[in-house]
């Protein structure tokens, strides 16, 4: 017989995507907390980065670039022409290229490969738009604990506190059901709640961000 005093989880059938429109991150400019926001968790190109501390801002669309390339045989000497012009802001419809072998100049239609710049981070938990370290992250008994934002953190807290956890949906795995086992384990309940309390008070470990970006292949155009 179940104990009527057991705390039941009543968070509802929330998918992970319900918490993926706001991300608290480490600001690349001042190293304090900033926010990355998106209108749709499945479309990240409209993401915005804003810091309330130093007023730094950045748009994900500004990070898109193109690698423009030509790979074909010269119609004069027959030798291979292979040229790539990296990090172009806009697509190129034509390129005027001299053959490196016979120096014959021709105008070609190039391939435009879409690319996106992201921040270089040593953290294992980053936002999906800029790859900046999440602000709400720390270690618990050798495991990485993180949350996208305070709403996400509070939902995890509600689940950890609960002693009676029933399946919330028959159609998909909810966010809390996908949590790592070390968070779900009853023996870690007190340790997890202490860590959550520290994160709520802003007592997390500080993570610095290198203030430069690296290129990350995004998708072919």
Image (tube, helix red, strand yellow):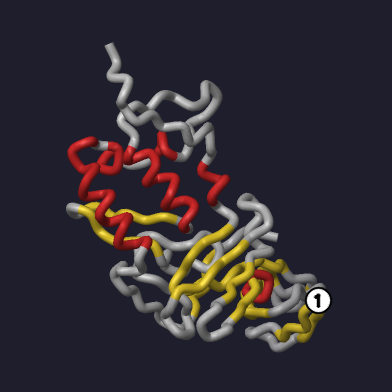
Name the quadrant of the N terminus: top left
Q: Hey, which residue is sitting farthest top in the picture?
A: 1
Image location of residue 190, percent across then percent down: 21, 46
- Looking at this view, is 175 or 215 the one in front? 175
Q: Residue 128: in sight, yes or no?
A: yes
At 46% from the left edge and 57% from the top edge, which residue is drawn?
A: 150
At 62% from the left edge and 74% from the top edge, which residue is drawn?
A: 63
At 31% from the left edge and 26% from the top edge, which residue is drawn?
A: 6
- Looking at this view, is 67 or 181 the one in front? 181
Image location of residue 100, percent across then percent down: 64, 85
Image location of residue 83, percent across then percent down: 63, 77
Q: Residue 80: in sight, yes or no?
A: no
Q: Is residue 57 above or below residue 153?
A: below
Which residue is labeled 1 in the image? 94
- Looking at this view, is 84 or 64 the one in front? 64
Q: Secondary structure at mark 1?
A: loop
Q: Hey, which residue is sitting farthest bottom in the picture?
A: 103
Relative horizontal placement of residue 159, taking residue 101 as reference (left or right): left
At 44% from the left edge and 45% from the top edge, which residue is drawn?
A: 155
Relative horizontal placement of residue 170, taking residue 142 as reference (left or right): right
Name the quadrant of the C terminus: bottom right
Quadrant of residue 38 in the image?
A: bottom right
- Looking at this view, is 159 or 18 the one in front? 159
């Amino acid at each position: 017989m179940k104990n009527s005093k057991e705390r039941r989880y009543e968070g509802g059938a929330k998918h992970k995507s319900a918490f993926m429109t706001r991300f608290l991150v480490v600001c690349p400019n001042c190293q304090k907390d900033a926010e990355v926001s998106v209108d749709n968790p499945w479309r990240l190109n409209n993401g915005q980065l804003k810091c309330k501390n130093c007023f730094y801002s950045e748009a994900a669309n500004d990070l898109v670039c193109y690698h423009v390339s030509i790979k074909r045989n010269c119609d004069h000497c027959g030798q291979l022409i292979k040229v790539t012009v990296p990090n172009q802001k806009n697509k190129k419809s034509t390129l005027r290229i001299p053959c490196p072998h016979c120096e014959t100049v021709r105008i070609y239609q190039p391939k435009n490969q879409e690319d996106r710049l992201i921040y270089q981070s040593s953290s294992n938990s980053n936002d999906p738009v800029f790859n900046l370290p999440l602000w709400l992250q720390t270690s618990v008994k050798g495991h990485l604990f993180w949350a996208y934002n305070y709403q996400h953190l509070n939902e995890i807290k509600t689940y950890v506190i609960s002693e009676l956890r029933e399946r919330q949906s028959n159609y998909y795995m909810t966010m809390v059901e996908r949590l790592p086992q070390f968070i779900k384990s009853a023996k870690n309940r007190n340790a997890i709640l202490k860590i959550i309390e520290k994160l709520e008070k802003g007592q997390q470990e500080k993570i610095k961000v290198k203030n430069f970006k690296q290129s990350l292949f995004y998708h072919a155009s």
